[in-house]
Image (spheres, rainbow, N blue to C red):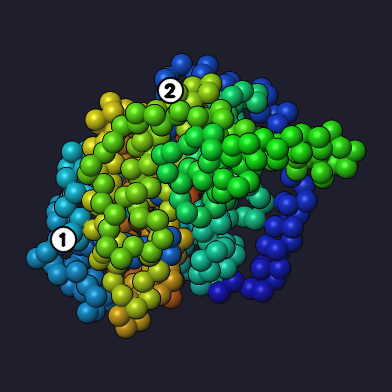
């Protein structure tokens, strides 16, 4: 196991990284980059779905072949998926029986599986983890720490803003109007992935904006709308040039927030309506289908945004994957149905080739059950969907799911694909150059694979 001084070193690196980051340097560097509109490849969007809590992917994908299945059954015990129920996706693997929609997407080559991906500091084997000869990410099995590392796109502790925020800054070299509408959060939680950069992420709670409400930005009408809103705006504008730097910065930020509803008034007038999205059963928080439907509605009016952004990144949060005392049957089926509905909406809009949707999760789960469910793990599988995806394939190396697996460390899969290799592939498709990828994902240099080849 990792020595205590390794953790102290990690904390030191984290603090040093936070102290040395300079927004001014980041801004000056990005001025050399091409604007999104100058890239010459039209509109593109990426939609990140967080499977919050740690998805038990071994109960989403299982081996079909008899010998491998017997080993899978031995370690998974009573929570193992029945062999005869598996939905074949390759000669050797199948989805669980309520993931028919994702099976169809896979067979239509619109969906790909990324095998055993996770947070890493550098490539590492289970043996190297056991003997402590290589560093591993800090607090591997902690929800908040691991989720944050995925959102930051960096497990070393040297980044303090989201990889999506860094990405957008490379695509919008100046504070043009489109940049304000390039990072969009439709979830019911704040998103570290969109943090940082010259512009804050915009938050939509529904497809409705008027000059008399700030609901879509988390404010009630008493603080932002109508005549009272104008009074507030006038008050803050008097403080914008205050000699008190903190007051001036706060006032400028607040005025921008107050102005947003006016700039976007009418955005959703006559917005496209969709009927195939499900709100799920007993969903925790904002349902996945509701969020994806909102993304589809926003995409249907993408050309109405001020500045007509050519690049947009969306964050979606799917709750309920922390299954210590249950199976994730419902979550897997609901994800499958929701992805199918979203892909159908994109095809209806004629932009399926321009939008790539992908999943991330805190971590995987333990191979063996703890009773009714499973405990926190490390390596996991991810899913990528879209018209530009080279689907119908499993990318990376599928691990052996068995007792005393050579691919596991204390019953947890050790990732064979780095988070950076996975994410940089879709960001490269988004339009980032090799130089930009190395800045967006500062630890990408530690891994041999920069492009996994799952994007066209």
Cα separation, mark 2 vs mark 1, equals 39 Å
- Position of residue 356 in the picture relative to residue 266 (left or right): left
Earlier residue among tags 2 and 1: 1
Quarter of the picture holding the C terminus = top left
Residue 426 location, quadrant: top left
- Position of residue 393 in the picture relative to residue 119 (left or right): left
Task: Tell me the residue at 27%/63% (across/down).
Answer: 281
Q: Is residue 434 in sight in this rendering?
A: no
Q: Which mark is residue 43?
A: none
| Residue 41 percent location from the top left of the image | 42, 19
Quick one: which residue is furthest to the right in this view? Answer: 243
* Disc 2 element: helix
Residue closer to the observer: 390 or 147: 147
Looking at the image, residue 190 lies above or below residue 237:
below
**Label 2 crowd bin: few (<14), some (14–19), many (20+), radius 10 Å:** some
Residue 111 location, quadrant: top left
Looking at the image, residue 418 lies above or below residue 362:
above
Q: Which mark is residue 97?
A: 1
Task: Tell me the residue at 28%/36% (across/down).
Answer: 273
* Disc 1 element: loop
Task: Tell me the residue at 65%/55% (across/down).
Answer: 157
Q: Which residue is mark 2?
A: 303
């Amino acid at each position: 196991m990792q020595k205590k001084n390794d953790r102290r070193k990690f904390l030191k690196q984290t603090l040093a990284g936070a102290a040395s980051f300079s927004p001014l340097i980041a801004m000056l560097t990005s001025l050399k980059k091409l604007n999104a509109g100058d890239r010459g490849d039209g509109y593109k969007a990426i939609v990140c779905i967080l499977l919050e809590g740690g998805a038990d992917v071994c109960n989403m994908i299982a081996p079909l072949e008899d010998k491998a299945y017997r080993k899978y059954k031995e370690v998974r015990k009573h929570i193992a998926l029945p062999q005869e129920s598996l939905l074949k996706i390759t000669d050797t693997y199948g989805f669980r029986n309520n993931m028919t929609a994702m099976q169809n997407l896979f067979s239509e080559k619109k969906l790909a599986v990324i095998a055993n991906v996770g947070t890493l500091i550098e490539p590492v084997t289970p043996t190297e983890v056991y003997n402590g000869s290589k560093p591993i990410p800090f607090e591997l099995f902690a929800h908040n720490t691991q989720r944050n590392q995925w959102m930051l796109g960096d497990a070393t502790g040297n980044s303090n803003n989201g990889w999506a925020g860094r990405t957008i800054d490379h695509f919008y070299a100046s504070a043009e109007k489109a940049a304000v509408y390039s990072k969009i959060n439709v979830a019911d939680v704040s998103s570290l992935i969109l943090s940082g950069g010259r512009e804050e992420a915009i938050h939509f709670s529904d497809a409705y904006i008027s000059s008399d409400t700030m609901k879509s930005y988390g404010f009630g009408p008493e603080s932002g709308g109508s005549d009272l809103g104008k009074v507030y705006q006038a008050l803050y504008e008097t403080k914008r040039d205050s000699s008190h730097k903190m007051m001036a910065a706060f006032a400028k930020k607040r005025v921008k927030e107050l102005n947003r509803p006016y700039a976007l008034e009418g955005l959703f007038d006559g917005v496209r309506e969709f009927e195939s999205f499900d709100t799920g059963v007993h969903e925790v928080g904002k349902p996945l289908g509701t969020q994806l439907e909102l993304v589809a509605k926003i995409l249907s009016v993408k050309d109405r945004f001020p500045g007509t952004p050519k690049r947009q990144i969306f964050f979606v949060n799917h709750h309920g994957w922390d299954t210590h005392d249950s199976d994730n049957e419902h979550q897997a089926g609901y994800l499958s149905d929701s992805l199918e509905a979203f892909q159908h909406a994109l095809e209806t809009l004629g932009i399926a080739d321009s939008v790539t949707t992908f999943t991330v999760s805190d971590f995987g789960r333990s191979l063996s059950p703890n009773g009714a469910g499973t405990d926190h793990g490390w390596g996991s599988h991810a899913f990528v969907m879209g018209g530009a995806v080279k689907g119908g394939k499993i990318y990376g190396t599928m691990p052996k799911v068995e007792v005393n697996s050579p691919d596991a460390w204390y019953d947890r899969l050790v990732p064979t694909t780095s988070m950076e290799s996975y994410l940089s592939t879709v960001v490269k498709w988004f339009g980032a150059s090799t130089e930009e990828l190395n800045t967006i994902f500062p630890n990408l240099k530690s891994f041999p694979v920069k492009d996994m080849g799952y994007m066209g």
